[in-house]
Structure formats: C-alpha cells, structure tokens
Amino acid sequence: KSMFTGQERFFFFPAIKATFYYVAVSVPLGIVFSFFVAVLLNQKVRGLGLFRSIFYLPVVIPLASTTLIWIWILQPNFGIANYLLQSVGLPPSTFLSSDTTFIPTLILFSIWLCGSTIIIFLAGLQSIPSHLYESIEIDGGNSWHKMLYVTIPLSSSVIFMNTVIGFINALQTFVQPTLMGGTAGTTTAGATGGPDLSGFLYVLYIFQSAFRFSRMGAASAAAVILIIVSIVLTYLIFKFSKSMVYYEGDGKNK
C-alpha cells in the first residue's frame, strides 16, 4: 500500500514511468536493428567473419566494463562522443547529464548490446531454404520481394522469440542505470538513476528499497509485481502473435 499512497510513491511511480519508456522504445528498436544487421551479415562478402565478431564483441565483454567504457565515451567535457559531434559541426549532447537525454542514451546503449539477438537472427536466416529465393528470382522478383515474402515470414518465429526475450531482459535492466546514473547524480538524496530519477528503472528501485533503505517488504512486493507483469506481458505477446508466427511443419500455417 505504501508504494501507491505513502512515501514509497515518490520512487515507485518514477520507476514505473522510466521503465515503461525504456522498454517500449528499446525493445522494438533493438529487434529492428538486430534483424537488419543479421540480414547484412547473412550476405556473402569478404571479411564476413570479422564483421560478425565486431557485432558480437560487446556481448563477450563484461557488462560493467562496457558500461564504464561508455561513461568515459559520453563524458560531456572530454568524451569522444561530443568530440566527434563537434568535429562534424553538431552541438555537443548532455547524454547522461540531463533528464531528457538519459533514457535515450540507455536505449542507444541497449542497441549496442544486441549481439546475442543478432546471432539468433542470423541462425534463423541461414536455415531458410535457398530454393525459395531462387523461386522468387525465377518469377521476376527483386530483393524487396524476397524480404517481404520469404525472409520475414520464415523468420517470424525467431522474431517472436527474440521479442519475448527482449521484453523480459529490458524489464530486468539494472547495471546500466546503476553505474551511469551514479555518475550523473540526482536531485533526490540517497538514490541513483540519473538526473531527477529519469533513469530510475524498476529493478533499480527494488535494489534501492531492499539494500539501501532496508524496506524489504516494499522490495518483495515490487519483485512480485515485476514477475506478474512479465508473465502477463509474455502471455499477451503469445496470444496476439499466434496467428502471425510461422512454424515449419505446422499445418495451421499452411
């Protein structure tokens, strides 16, 4: 009850708002970006192994180390990101120092970490029979027809799986806002998550409630809510995507 009406609401509702914003934007963008990159990496070009390694490398590096590297890159005064922006005539960005750019920066970082999703998409693309593309070519189709009538339909099950995993992982985001928010500071004493709690995501709220403020009851209740939301969201995704997902050998999709 205190989460909705008591002192907890000053942290609970900002956490809900920030998490909804982050999940609603980062997951669709991550899926689209990963699928597009996987299609490019599925082409026969020189140095393909190198390109695949480059996109998967951020996943191999420990998340905390990658986050610290990004904090250095996005530092407003001497970071390389603002240096590159100014070198091409663009104004510098506040990145982690403003409540309007903190979540977009987290979203950009989440796209950087899409290596596992790209690999899964790539495995799905390589399982598509080549004779289907040849049939499109014989019928006079182009690359767009291949994408629309072969690649996307036969990758729908992989898109579905990555979407479910993406939503669940996004709801549990913790390391990035903890480290990045701690460097940016906040106007609320005793909490991290960026300026004015702009990046105070839900799992960070659970952690702060339990281990900083010793409110184990509120943290436990919030954790149960997170589990319920994850289950309901997964169920809704299963329900509304059932007719749009193709599974090979399933007679209902023929």
Image (cartoon, helix red, strand yellow):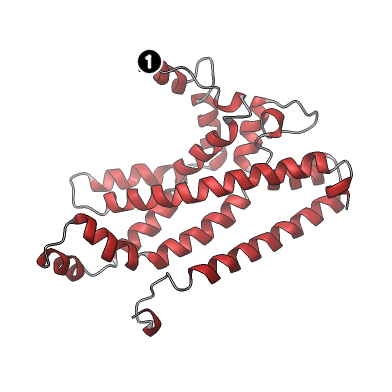
Q: Residues within 10 Å of mark 1 (few under 14, many from 20)?
A: few
Q: Residue at x 85, y 40 (%)?
A: 213
User: Where does residue 36 sit, x and y in percent of width and height?
Assistant: 34, 50
User: Where does residue 3 sit, x and y in percent of width and height?
Assistant: 83, 48
Q: Residue at x 81, y 46 (%)?
A: 210
Q: Residue at x 69, y 25 (%)?
A: 185
Residue 158 drawn above or below residue 25: below
Q: Is residue 234 left or right of residue 125?
A: right
Q: Amino acid at mark 1?
A: Gly
* Towards the viewer: 144 or 35: 144
- The total of numbered circles placed on residues is 1
Mark 1 lies on residue: 89
Secondary structure beneath disc 1? loop
Q: Residue at x 58, y 36 (%)?
A: 103
Q: Is residue 118 left or right of residue 43?
A: right
Residue 243 image-quadrant placement: bottom left
Residue 223 image-quadrant placement: bottom right
Q: Is residue 131 left or right of residue 20?
A: left
User: Where does residue 154 sit, x and y in percent of width and height?
Assistant: 33, 68
User: Where does residue 131 sit, x and y in percent of width and height?
Assistant: 17, 70
* Towards the viewer: 39 or 61: 39
Residue 147 drawn above or below residue 104: below
* Towards the viewer: 176 or 85: 85
Q: Quadrant of the C terminus?
A: bottom left
